[in-house]
Amino acid sequence: MIRSYLFTPAHRPELIARAHERGADAILLDLEDSVPRDRKQAARDGLAEAVSVLTARAVPVVIRVNADLGECVRDLEAAILPGVDAIMLPKVIGADHLRLVADYLSMLERQAKLPEGQIKLIALIETAQGLMNTASIAKATPRLTALAFGTEDFSTDCGHAPSVEALKGPAQSLIHAAKAGGLQAIGLPGSIAEIHDMDSFRACVDLGRAIGFDAVLCIHPRQVEIVNAAFTPSASEIEQATRVVEAFDRATQQGLGAVMLDGKMIDPPIVARAHSMLQSRRL
């Protein structure tokens, strides 16, 4: 299970060469915001080498393309490479938007003689319109593996600061849509831009995990350790999950559908969460 995605500008080979050392579960090669307009073609031209460097280190690779249609097409054509795990599509506003890109990816994969469907999609939700359509977006294409929350652009679109108070509700809506679609939910209920006040960032990450996010987009290496720690079950959580599973197994053997443990009723939904936590530890 991927906990942390680290944005790395695709036009910076010196950063790409060391990206695998930062501890992130996946490297997100960025062709969009972190790449100046006059360097975008150079970034595309260097993608094959960048992907090769990362896959040699057994690091999952995601590529964020541009939202502009012309740039997006050129990005997709450059990104159809062995070793690319997924494309992150920014500013997704509806299911048709996602299906159009998925169909184009199928054509490009056939031309490149790659297995069709090999490259997955992550939909980045960055507008109020996109958030309103997350339920249909989540079911748009089998290529889709995750919904990600772009809090900075979303806040700008909605006219408010990227505060926890403003973003917790929208974040929860995105999480619900992702879970209903069987997808990973990636993001924070706050600003992704915090790289100095690590206590504040840690609190936001902890809240994100508490409300159901599965992973976080990181824009700086110092965020990665905090994210990985937050999304790794602690020893006490693993111990409690194990006790829950064992207690319920004993109850089942006795013909019971629920059991008391530490003063709380343990029933199938609680056991399912315990199993999920134990499974995540093994991934």
Image (cartoon, grey):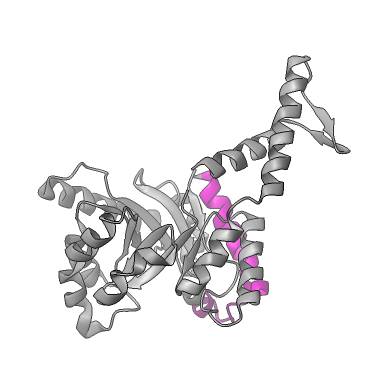
Residue 233 x %, y %: 62, 50
Our reading of the magenta stretch's main secondary structure is helix
Above or below — where is 137 with respect to 206? above
Asked whether residue 2 is in view, the answer is yes
Tell me if residue 158 is in the magenta stretch.
yes
Residue 99 x %, y %: 31, 51
Q: 205 or 95, which lies in front?
A: 205
Residue 140 x %, y %: 39, 48
Asked whether residue 91 is in view, the answer is no
Q: Residue at x 29, y 67 (%)?
A: 65
Q: Residue at x 68, y 73 (%)?
A: 165
Q: 134 or 151, which lies in front?
A: 151
Q: Is residue 116 left or right of residue 18?
A: left
Tell me if residue 147 is in the magenta stretch.
no
Q: Is residue 180 left or right of residue 107?
A: right
Residue 156 x %, y %: 50, 80
Q: Which residues are magenta?
A: 154-180
Q: 263 or 57, which lies in front?
A: 57
Q: Quadrant of residue 241?
A: top right
Image mark count: 0
Q: 135 or 246, which lies in front?
A: 246
Above or below — where is 32 with respect to 20? below
Q: Residue at x 48, y 57 (%)?
A: 133
Q: Quadrant of residue 56?
A: bottom left
Q: Quadrant of residue 247?
A: top right
Above or below — where is 15 with respect to 178? below
Q: Is residue 46 left or right of residue 201?
A: left
Q: Residue at x 78, y 15 (%)?
A: 254
